Amino acid sequence: MQSSVVRALMPVALAAACAAGLPSARAAEPAVLTVLQGEATLLVGARALVAVAGARLPAGSIVETSEQTGLLRLEWVDGSRLDLGASTRVMLQPAASPRSLVYVLRGVVKQTQSTATAGQLSPAFELKPFQGVVVTQIGSEGAVLFAEVGTEAVIGRRGNVPLSLKAGQAAVVEGDAPARAQPRPPAGWLAAIPRAFRDTLPSRLAQFQGPPPALKERPSPGYAAVMPWLVAEPMLRRELPRRWAEWLAEPAFKDAVLARLTQHPEWEPLVRPAPPRAADRPGARRSAEPAASAPETPR
């Protein structure tokens, strides 16, 4: 997709962000991809794009790294930063959670906030707007949120458990158990975090002040590629039919949506539209109206 398409999307993203009450500086500016080691895919609206340094990403964009990605960094003008590791899926500034800089669906993310302007959301944790550095890992068997710098107010979403973490402490979820605070992360956890997360890399935002690069389009993703988002929690799923409706033109995608409709029922109006009411059918209004009187013959 050409950069003009991204620019065309910006007024819509800006209006939605302002309506949601985001800080004006972030609402007016997209995220800028400033570091990319490896490959990643960007989902902006219904378009899948090849990630490149310098890309601008409006609110609602989805970023997905590959198994081979070493590091992907996003920066905002207010100093907020996100570092993504391999096999990570995130949505930036989700409309359903306007105080969150990011929704972490899967993988490992390091979030840095120089001011308490934004928090973070994931299936396991809700992190209130904070000032500091946190590292979050979301996996199929559990989750960890590590307070690297600062004191963070965290809610374990299963059971609505409030936690307060000081620097060096962690919130941990194992299986179906509620979140609990620990004086340190689980044994061996820090060793498994990407090495790039252990360094404090300087901002590179100033290097990308010119026009954004043109972005190359990928083929529209198949159902399996986006299924983790399609079956995510309802607050995220509700907007996806509007965003991805054009993908239903691909028969395989539509068939897959129909086959799993119980997992994402918000697609039903698009794949099984209700039949028109009798009053809305063509000709119904004409047949219900009385015939016009014939004009009188002049005498």
Image: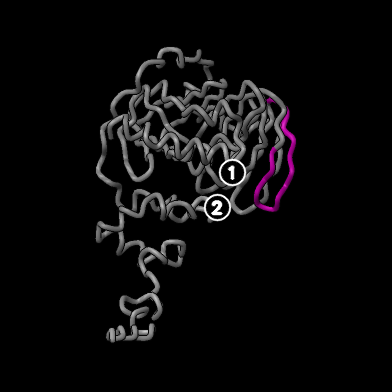
Label placed on residue 235 = 2
Is 81 above or below relative to 251?
above
Q: Residue at x 50, y 44 (%)?
A: 105
Q: Position of residue 241 (x, y in %)?
A: 41, 55
Give the amino acid at mark 1. Answer: Ser
Label placed on residue 44 = none
Q: Residues within 10 Å of mark 1 (few under 14, many from 20)?
A: some
Q: Position of residue 272 (x, y in %)?
A: 37, 70
Q: Position of residue 52 (x, y in %)?
A: 33, 26
Tell me: 11 left or right of 143. Answer: left
Between the C-alphas of marks 2 and 1, the distance is 8 Å
Q: Residue at x 65, y 23 (%)?
A: 115
Give the amino acid at mark 2. Answer: Met
Q: Which residue lies under the disc numbered 1? A: 97
Q: Residue at x 61, y 29 (%)?
A: 134
Q: Position of residue 83 (x, y in %)?
A: 49, 27
Disc 2 is placed on an element classified as helix
Residue 51 falls inside the magenta stretch: no
Pick the front one: 174 or 62: 62
* Quadrant occupied by the C terminus: bottom left
Circles 2, 1 touching at the beta carbon (< 8 Å):
yes
Is 140 above or below relative to 168?
below
Start-end of magenta stretch: 154-167
Disc 1 is placed on an element classified as loop
State which tag comes first along the sequence, 2 or 1.
1
Pick the front one: 92 or 10: 10
Tell me: 103 left or right of 214. Answer: right
